[in-house]
Image (cartoon, rainbow, N blue to C red):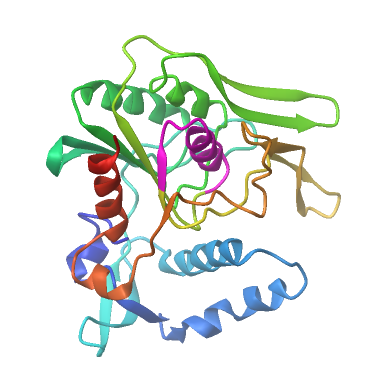
Amino acid sequence: RVQTGSTAEQAGLKSGFVIEKIDGKTVAELLAPLEKSFAKRPLPEAQKRIHREKTLLSFFGGNVETKARIEVLNDKNQRQIFDVARVKRKGEMSAAVGNFPPQEVVFEAKRLANNIGYIRFNMWIIPQMSKIREAIRSMKDANGIIFDLRGNPGGIAGMAPGVAGLLVKEQTSLGSMTGRNSEIKFIVYPQADVFEGKVAILTDYGTGSTSEIFAAGMQELGRAKVVGERSAGAVLPSVFDTLPTGAVFQYAISDYKSPKSILIENCGVIPDTEIKLTRQTLLDGRDVQIEEAVKQIKNTN
């Protein structure tokens, strides 16, 4: 995704271009240490893709007022170089919560054709809750709402039942998390003035944690259709401890089961309709997953 208004967009980068080099180093060179580490820890392919993306994104960063030199294959399959300015982030940031550091707040809500609402947010963090609530209620007359959770890695799990409460008429559950000595049930309490229209949820390999709780729960309750790709299968809550060496140790503290007692970890949420983005459709300016979600809403009885 090339963010609207970003220096990458201003430089001319477009969705569908294939990145080959960053600052003179090939993608293979930049990823070599990570690929070597994969041999020591088996991971699902979806989670490997997430780590690769995060690693490459880290190389785009640098000192403000410098430029990242990005070499790509463009829409004509020709090599092209773009010098993209690095700028300081100016957007809203969330507050730190426990081990959870401040995060950038990215939110988008709009109406698509056919009077269908569209809501996208980058993470489940506290500042998003009021934005989501306001967006859903502003779309009360919409024929349906699409929640775009592609690339959303999760966040604060307790937010998922809160959002679901804006979409269901009766008390229900999004599943539960069980630890050695505790259990957390994600009870959904219906809120006033719920949205009763159709709901579709977009997922991909970067959809994780709280996003998977929301997608799996809403799917199994029959309240939403899931469209896109299988999710990450990375739903376990974890905590961080600092070891005497200074290394940070992250470990899971409980397991998640969906409303039908299905384990999502390492399996992911399977879409009702699986459809993948292709380079050509991206170059054509089309998002076939959104198109399919719109189709699902229009055709659902």
Q: In this picture, which residue range is highlighted in magenta? A: 208-226
Give x and y (percent) for residue 175. Answer: 62, 29
The answer to whether residue 214 is magenta is yes
The verdict on residue 83 being magenta is: no
Frontmost residue, 271 versus 2? 271
On screen, 214 above or below 205?
above
Q: Nearer the viewer, residue 235 or 22?
A: 235
In depth, the one of 170 and 286 nearer the eye is 170
Q: Is residue 41 above or below residue 100?
A: below
Q: Identify which residue is drawn at 34% across, 78% down.
A: 18
Q: Quadrant of the N terminus?
A: bottom left
Residue 14 visible from this viewpoint: no
Residue 51 visible? The answer is yes
Q: Quadrant of the C terminus?
A: top left
Name the spot of residue 194 as percent of width and height, x first: 34, 16
Name of the residue lying farthest toward the front? 301
